[in-house]
Image: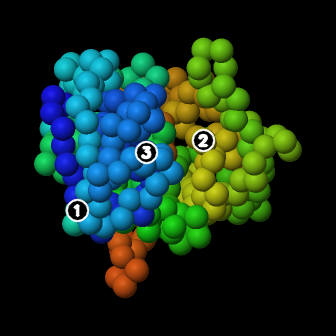
Amino acid sequence: MSKVQFVTIDADQAGQRIDNFLITFLKGVPKSRIYRILRKGEVRVNKKRVKPVYKIQAGDQVRVPPVEVSQSSEAPININLDKVQQLESQIIYESDHVIVINKPSGIAVHGGSGLSFGVIEALRQLRPEARYLELVHRLDRDTSGCLLIAKKRSALRYLHEQLRDKKLYKEYVALAVGRWPKSTQRVDAPLLKNTLKSGERIVKVDEAGKPSITDFKIERKYDGFTLVQAVPVTGRTHQIRVHAQFAGCPLVGDPKYGNSDIDRELNESFGFNRLFLHARKLKFREQRDSKPLVVSAEFDEPIEQLMKSLNNEAI
């Protein structure tokens, strides 16, 4: 940014701290730089200096000084344009408030940890005119299905409120190895997250972990596999995958918690080489006065083909 900008705060932006507003407004600028320009008084609200904790109000005029964006923080120039364009076709619902995308397996929801870009960066490339696009929740890189993105800050606040109050319904479907025990309809097991020296995250059932609950329901039995519905009551990292492993039926295609021998057989026999965990359905309200909205995401071709192959072995 090469010149001073004056931004008039609207109702949707109001209520947040000035530092958080600048972090969003000046994407790519290090937080240390943002706090420095606040500390030096280069940022003014209604011509006055403010502290980082100041909450901006509708009608406030914010002076944003020229700030250089570091090259490493800008959108990567080697972004895969083909994948970006493919994401456009994966949008299954859009309104003035939200976007729901059927996220493909193998694409991260955001860049980082050695990844040049993710879904949110790609959407910002697709929609440069969009003033605000933020993830409402996350999916593991290898998980496919419904991913919810807010287009307004007010929408993000309300959707996060629904998440906290457990009023945002998320339903997954997964293929588990073996016969899922009929007696296991709910797994209530605390999860502890560890980060290895390599940076890899590993989660395990541990009494020292955070309370974690997943509800499971058998949908169909196959010879050696069970198709299950999984509804997470809590939202921990790798929760469904670890709880399935804890129940004695790890998920097909899970490189961290699965059965590598069976996964190798499925790859050799059917060419299936991805995690079979799909976020099938979301149910939420876009606004407080709106009716509940249900959005569903179809399976991708690899899952469809595997299901057809397994159907012949169904019992």
Q: Which mark is on residue 94?
A: 1
Is tag 2's residue or tag 3's residue first in the polypeptide sequence? Answer: 3
Distance of label 2 from label 3 (alpha carbons): 31 Å
* Residue type at the position of mark 1: Glu
Q: CA distance from mark 1 to mark 3?
A: 29 Å
Is residue 141 visible from the viewing direction of this image?
no
Where in the figure is residue 183, as x and y percent of width and height? 77, 62
Please state, as top left, top right, bottom left or bottom right, where the C terminus lies in the image: bottom right
Residue that numbered label 2 is attached to: 238
Image disc number at residue 19: 3
Q: Quadrant of residue 78?
A: top left
Residue 55 position in % (x across, y down): 44, 58
* Secondary structure found at label 1: strand
**Where is 29 relative to 70, above or below?**
below
Eyeballing the image, is 119 above or below 266?
Answer: below
Amino acid on which disc 3 is placed: Asp
Q: Residues within 10 Å of mark 2 (few under 14, many from 20)?
A: some
Of marks 1 and 2, which one's residue comes earlier in the chain? 1
Quadrant of the drawing holding the N terminus:
top left
Asked where in the image residue 166 lies, by quadrant, the reply is: bottom right
- Mark nearest the camera among 1 and 2 is 1
Q: What residue is rendered at 67% in x and 41% in y?
A: 242
At 26% from the left edge and 41% from the top edge, which residue is drawn?
64
Image position of 72 (left or right of 223): left
Give the residue drawn at x 33%, y 42%: 43
Residue 164's spot in the image, x, y percent?
58, 64
Secondary structure under the numbered disc 3 in the rendered image: helix
Residue 77 position, x and y percent, is: 19, 20
Mark in front: 2 vs 3:
3
Q: Residues within 10 Å of mark 3 (few under 14, many from 20)?
A: many
